[in-house]
Image (cartoon, rainbow, N blue to C red):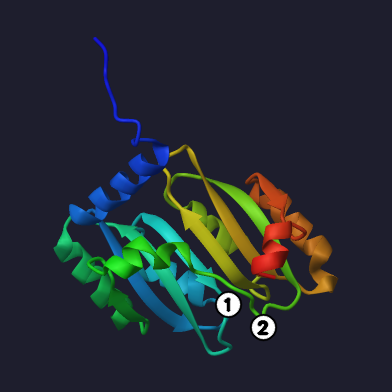
Amino acid sequence: MAIASGANTNFDRLRFVAERAEVGEHREAVLAVTIPEERGSFRRFCKALGGRNITEFNYRMSDPRVAHLFVGVTVHDRGEAGRIVRALRRAGFGTLDLSDDEVAKGHMRHMIGGHAAPAQRELLYRFEFPERPGALMKFLTAMNPGWNISLFNYRNLGADYGSILVGIQVPPADKRTFRSFLAKLGYPSFDESRNPAYRLFLA
């Protein structure tokens, strides 16, 4: 048996179709969430999600008072999306459901970022997280509470592991402690602090 496919169908197009199918069938909620720009907020936000699967997370430090997150979450139906929104609001996080917003789905999810003057002493690391529940919480729990996450980018692509890009503000005196944190965490990690694209667009 032979399968014929049009030349305009490639992996990029298939990824687009898969993303739209998830949202269109109400299996993914796309949310804009505002949290305080303070240590521990990211962890409180993940706890408020109640162990649900995060499909996408985009954040870049920009305001010294609040942080705006672009988040995708796996849901079973539209009703669950509403319950997530209410739970986040009860936890004190301003939340907007963008699941039906074409600009957000088609453009904004790929445009989160920019230069961030407040992100001083930022180290940029790329991690390979295992795609299993609790992997992100393990990372957040192991991290020194005195360090601040200034950038976070993640998208679930259906592989055994997810590629995560994280900016972490680490004081120079904590460099040795940071290396111990990486070793204890056990996830493959790569220092991207001198990456030319990062220095051009985000640093």
Percent across and percent down for residue 41 are 50, 77
Give the residue number, with chain letter if any, for mark 2. Answer: 118
Identified at 49% across, 69% down, the residue is: 112
Residue in view at x 19 percent, y 63 percent: 80
Please state which amino acid type lies under the numbered disc 1: Met
Between 42 and 151, the residue placed more toward the observer is 151
Looking at the image, can residue 183 be seen?
yes
Left or right: residue 192 compared with residue 63: right
CA separation in Å, label 2 and label 1: 7 Å
Taking the view exactly as shown, the residue that stands out farthest to the front is 7
Question: In the image as oriented, which residue stretches furthest toward the bottom?
Answer: 65
Q: How many tags in the picture?
A: 2
Q: Quadrant of the C terminus?
A: bottom right
The answer to whether 4 is drawn above or below residue 100 in the figure is above
Circle 2: residue type: Pro
What is the quadrant of residue 144 in the picture?
Answer: bottom right
Residue extending furthest top?
Answer: 1
**Which percent across, then down, holds residue 188?**
65, 44
**Residue 124: percent from the left, percent from the top?**
69, 62
Residue 61 has which mark? 1
Q: Where is residue 7 in the image (x, y as percent from the top left)?
A: 35, 31
CB within 8 Å, label 2 to label 1: yes
Q: Which of marks 2 and 1 is nearer the N terminus?
A: 1
Q: Which residue is at a point 23% across and 53% down the rendered structure image?
A: 27
